Image (cartoon, grey):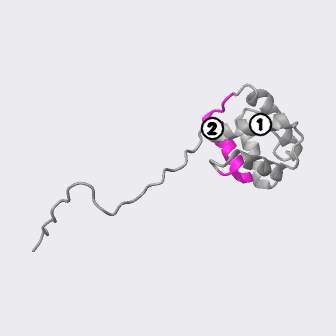
Amino acid sequence: MDEHAQRAAVRFIVSLDRSVDADSFSDDDAWAFMQDLVNEYARDQRNLSQPQAAALRDFGHTIGIRPGGPLHSYAPCLEGSLGPCPLDRADFDLLLTWAHAQVNADFTMKPVDKVTLDAEPRGPVPPPRKPLWE
């Protein structure tokens, strides 16, 4: 894990009222914390507070997760930063689904409606305005 991702991960862990030694924090520590997240938050569908969610978004942004990004982009970013996931597949999928909901606040983007522009005016056309100064 690079230095920026490590600092963001430590900030997120501290936001959950946990102590962590930033100097010796490693990828294995991060994965152990991910298992704790599954056990304490994801299984019960507990929501994070606003500051905690902001710290999670910051960590996600640091490892390459874009706000509003699709769920399938989370696993490659997380494993690319922390190495292969030691969690079992069901826990990992649960963690990713929960984190996606927390980062996006259970918000899913609706596709933008296509707007067709019509150059013809609709309704009566107002008369031209007189110039203010002649």
Label 1 environment density (alpha carbons within 10 Å; few <14, some 14–19, many ≥20): many
According to the image, label 1 marks what residue?
95
Say which amino acid is labelled 1.
Leu
Where residue 79 appears, as percent x and y from the top left, is 83, 49
Instruction: Examine the rendered structure and indicate whether residue 69 appears above or below residue 100.
Output: below
User: 98 or 14, which lies in front?
Assistant: 98
Q: Which x, y percent locates residue 31?
A: 85, 41
Alpha carbons under labels 1 and 2: distance apart: 19 Å
Q: Is residue 26 visible?
A: no
Q: Position of residue 76 (x, y in %)?
A: 79, 51
Q: Amino acid at mark 2?
A: Pro
Q: Residue at x 20, y 56 (%)?
A: 124
Q: Is residue 31 left or right of residue 112?
A: right
Q: Which residues are magenta?
A: 46-66
Left or right of 93 on screen, residue 123: left
In-image side of 55 versus 84 (left or right): left
Q: Nearer the viewer, residue 79 or 32?
A: 79
Q: How many marks?
A: 2
- The C terminus: image quadrant: bottom left
In terms of image quadrants, where is residue 118?
bottom left
**Image point 15% across, 62% down: which residue?**
127
Secondary structure at badge 2 equals helix
Disc 1 vs disc 2: which is toward the camera?
1
Secondary structure of residue under mark 1:
helix
Crowding near the residue tagged with mark 2, few <14, some 14–19, many ≥20 C-alpha atoms within 10 Å: few
Going 73% across and 50% down the picture, which residue do you hit?
Answer: 73
Q: Quadrant of residue 130?
A: bottom left
